[in-house]
Image (cartoon, grey):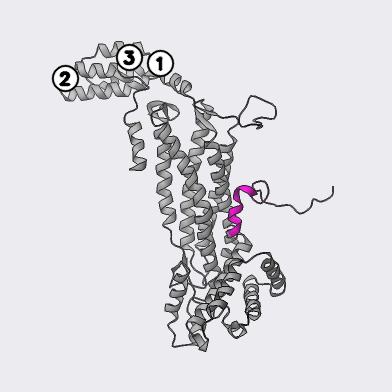
Amino acid sequence: MSPLPPQPLSPLDGRYRSAVEGLGDHLSEAGLNRARVHVEVEWLLFLADHRMFGAEPVDAEQARSLRAWASEFGQPEIDELARLEATTRHDVKAVEYLVRQRLAEQGLTPLAELTHFACTSEDVNNLSYGLTLRAALVDVWLPRFDAVVAKLRELALAHRDQPLLAHTHGQPATPTTFGKELAVFVHRLRRQRDRIVAVEFPAKFSGATGTFSAHVAADPDADWPALSRAFVTSLGLSWNPLTTQIESHDGQAELFGRIAHANRILHNLATDVWTYISMGYLTQIPQPGATGSSTMPHKINPIRFENAEANLELSSALLDSLASTLTTSRLQRDLTDSTTQRNIGVALGHSLLALDNLLKGLGEIAVNPDALAADLDGNWEVLGEAIQTVIRAEVTAGRSSIADPYALLKELTRGKRATAEDLAEFIRGLDIGDAAKERLLALTPATYTGLASELVDHLDA
């Protein structure tokens, strides 16, 4: 068998590329190198602006040109970095040489020694990861997440009054509304979103072991912590003053834990919708040309929700591993984080793919009111809760002398099918007030939804 041409090993770079390609702009190797170039350029301009070691600030046009080159990082730079790294065998050193080349092209050779000045590779890397991860989150992942939440809110409002037989422990339970059940997910996801966006992106810029040793050797009079803080915060990151060679990654661990939590809420949504489809409560809208089964023409499989489940599980497993690994580094530095962080894009990619499938899946379902009504009408025994609770209230108010109302209703309904007529006859024979009796006689499983519909209003409170 002849070998295939080079193929993507990950389905994220093959079959599902179109759904996740936005992440590649930030969390790929090229995206990381673009951020590294940006950091290196900003650092040397920062040093020049502060006239360190007699340097003069770069004039506005030269600085603009240098920054434009960094932001327009593309295939020529990618190719040149590959050539340089083949010699250096070090990715960050290759970036330094690339920046030096650009300085020479712009006639800024006198600034060359300010490139990567007093930096350890991790100074550049941790800033670059902070920038790329924040951009990926804000520009790509959050908009897709927000679109899913917005679709859920739309469905919750549309179906706020649609009665639904609830199921606890898989058994018929007190009815609710379909809209209220979706509103629960909206509320949970919004809460988790707030926690995701609240995570800081800490960064360090303090040398080989976090001590500013080389900096002080070069200029013992400079306030290097203050300069470091000013530089880090100028990039929109938060400054971490106490580190080893590496930034401690606690911010990333917090972020990955919170995204994994959001994944698991979405996983719960996917399994619930899948279950409602299997029960006939929801129908799937046929898509033109789509095939549900290779042999059974009638089928419309809930593949969007199954795909989401699988990808959310993969994403959460990777995010858990990232959070666990990144919080530990032997003594002042080991390289476990370097390899691990290169998989951030994969972890978020599986989550993004799941969001894409959920958004499409939620747009391809419809409520089946006939099935919902039939199930409600077949389970009148769920009104047992209402009856025994009303009796308790009547006993407390002195309008009834019934002993142990719960046991009375348990005897009537537990493990049995009770019809509307059975319950009406039972209610008429109760020793309770007329107003309570009439209220119970008017109740049906479809109307026994309490404040479910009104609770949906809390989404916009």
The mark that comes first in sequence, 1 or 3, is 1
Residue located beneath label 2 in the image: 399
Bin the neighbour count of mark 3 within 10 Å (Cα to Cα): few under 14, some 14-19, many 20 and up. many
Q: Amino acid at mark 1?
A: Arg
Magenta span? 9-25
Percent from the top left, x then y, of residue 80?
A: 70, 70
* Residue 11 in the image, given as x and y percentages of width and height: 66, 48
Measuring 53% from the left and 49% from the top, which residue is drawn there? Answer: 316
Instruction: Find the distance from the CA under tag 2 to the CA under tag 3.
Output: 20 Å
**In terms of sequence position, does the residue under pointer 2 or pointer 3 come before the other?**
2
Compare residues 120 and 291 and report the one nearer the observer.
Answer: 291
Check disc 3 and give the amino acid type: Leu
Vertical placement of 10 versus 288: above or below? below
Disc 3 is placed on an element classified as helix
The span from disc 2 to disc 1 (Cα, nearest Å) is 29 Å
Residue 241 is left or right of residue 317, and the answer is left
Q: Residue at x 69, y 30 (%)?
A: 294
Sequence order check: which comes first, mark 2 or mark 1? Answer: 2
Asked whether 24 falls inside the magenta stretch, the response is yes
Task: Identify the secondary structure beneath mark 1.
Answer: loop
Residue 85 x %, y %: 69, 71
Q: Residues within 10 Å of mark 2 (few under 14, many from 20)?
A: some
Q: Which mark is residue 417?
A: 1
